[in-house]
Each structure stands twice: as structure tokens, then as C-alpha cells.
Image (tube, coloured by chain):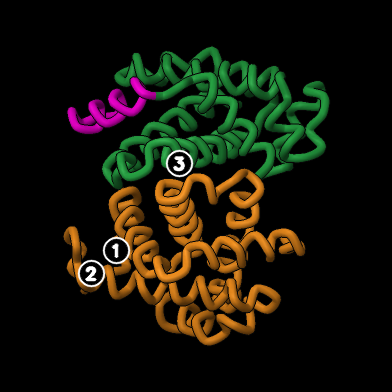
Chain colours: A orange, B green
Amino acid sequence: MVLHANDKSNVKAVFGKIGGQAEEYGAETLERMFATYPQTKTYFPHFDLGKGSAQVKGHGKKVAAALVEAANNVDDIAGALSKLSDLHAQKLRVDPVNFKLLGQCFLVVVASHNPSLLTPEVHASLDKFLCAVGTVLTAKYR
Amino acid sequence: MVHWSAEEKQLIASVWAKVNVEECGAEALARLLIVYPWTQRFFDNFGNLSSPTAIIGNPKVRAHGKKVLTSFGDAIKNLDNIKGTYSKLSELHCDKLHVDPENFRLLGDILVIVLASHFGRDFTPSCQFAWQKLVGVVAHALARKYH
């Protein structure tokens, strides 16, 4: 699955519009993921996952930063996220199925905050982008 | 049998009461065909699906989207027997329509996103939980009679 020119420009535009709210979106994405798919909490036994958790906010910020980095380097997501890919393969080993769940929640956050931004075409590009990020992060698993 | 808490039932009902079935259904199906273009394989007789604009404006897509979401309403009216409600539809999707059940999951996820875009902040994480559960149960029920 390949990101075409229109996908790349849609992704850049989305993250451009989201701008400084990316951190907030990251935190809410995690909050929704933990609420909607409780099995994802198993990767965070060391976290306080209660409402408003500072740890979840902090981690959401990291997740958002990675997505922003990937969007800013959309021509070479594998290169941009290479270290994160190593981390996920060697240390975190999050089961690949969970990246789709995170992606779904990110789309829900964008849709609920900014419905006019998520046109069907942009929705398609963003979904592809999130798939690509998940693929990169699990690429070195075996 | 699926267990629904009182809160889940209330969250589902309160969202559903405000849903425009025709609009939401049309939008969900259109987005399915746009975001996952391979799903167009089931709709060769729908005419022009050549672009997002064509898909969104296509009257057959709109009509079918309305039909599909109206059927969701049946599940919501019968939360305690979704299996029974969808038994015949499951057979139909297997024997006549030959639809891979993965497509039910894809449509369910898209529906949740459409609801989020319509309801904004009101589509809380708890709401999302209840609705993802519902679309999952519907998908499972539709796949149940496959053989």
C-alpha cells in the first residue's frame, strides 16, 4: 500500500491544520483507545490510566510527536521512525493488531474535533498514513 | 448472549435518537467505498463510482446506505437478541451476496467515525465504547451463519 502524491499532501494539510493541538489529540486518542479497547491497557500496567492522568497526557504527547514527525517526513516514514521501529521490535513488542485500534481512535478524535477537516478523501489518505505508520513500527518484529 | 449495561443501552439509544438514518447511512457507505475502494467489488451495478464526488452523489449508494443503517435500527430495537434479528441477513450475505465478513467490521469502524464527526464532543469515549461494541456485535451476528 503506497501513499500517492494526493495522500501526502492531504496528510501534510491535516497536520498543518491540527498544529499545536497535536498533543491534545494524542492524549485524547490514548484516552479513547483505553476506554474503547480495554485490552490495550495491558501494555501500561505501570501507568495511572484514570481520567486526566498526567502519564497518559505525557505519553499522548510522544505519540502525537511521532505522528507529526512521520507527516513531516512523509516521503520517508521508515527513515523518520527507524529508531521508534527498533524500540517497538526489541523492547515494546506491541502486538501489530493494536496499531489499527490506535489509528481508529485518532480518526475519531479528528472527526469529533474537526469534522470539516475529515472529508472522505482526507479520511482515506489519513487512514492510509496511519496504516503506513503501523507497518513501519512493526516492520522489524521478525 | 451479549450483556449490555444500562449505561451502554442509554448511550446507544440517546445517540440513535438524534441520527438522521438516511444521511448517516449514505455517508457511511460512501466513505466505505472511498476509504476502502476494494469494497466497490460488491457494487458493479451501482453505476458511476469513479471518484469520491461520483460516489457521494450516487443515488444507489445513498439508497443502499439508508437501507443498511435502517437495518442497524433493528439491532438497536433488539439489543438482547441481535443474533436472532440478523439470522436471515447473515445467510443472505453468505449464500447470495458472498460478502467477506471483514467488510462488516470495516463499515462498523467507518460508522463510528461518521457519528463522531456529527456529534463532536458529545461522542464521548464511553459513547465510542458502546458503539464500537455494538458494531462489533452486529458484525459478528452477520457472520454467524457463514459456512
Identify the disc placed on residue A42: 1
Q: Give the Cα separation between the discs numbered 1 and 2.
A: 6 Å
Magenta range: B1-18
Q: Nearer the viewer, mark 2 or mark 3?
A: 3
| Cβ–Cβ under 8 Å for marks 1 and 2 | yes
Residue A116 screen position, x and y as percent: 52, 46
Identify the disc placed on residue A45: 2
Q: Residue at x 59, y 57 (%)?
A: A126
**Chief secondary structure of the magenta span?**
helix
Q: Amino acid at mark 1?
A: Thr
Q: Residue at x 75, y 27 (%)?
A: B43
Q: Closer to the camera, B106 or B30?
A: B30
Q: Magenta stretch containing residue B14, yes or no?
A: yes
Relative side of A66 to B66, left or right = left
Q: Count neighbours of disc 2 (C-alpha within 10 A) and say few if under 14, some if 14 to 19, many if 20 or more.
A: few
Residue A26 screen position, x and y as percent: 38, 65
Q: Magenta stretch containing residue B83, yes or no?
A: no
Q: Judging from the image, what secondary structure is the residue with disc 2 in?
A: loop
Residue A62 screen position, x and y as percent: 39, 76
Image height of A124 relative to B147, above or below: below
Image height of B92 relative to A126, above or below: above
Q: Count neighbours of disc 3 (C-alpha within 10 A) and say few if under 14, some if 14 to 19, many if 20 or more.
A: many
Q: Give the Cα separation between the discs numbered 2 and 3.
A: 32 Å
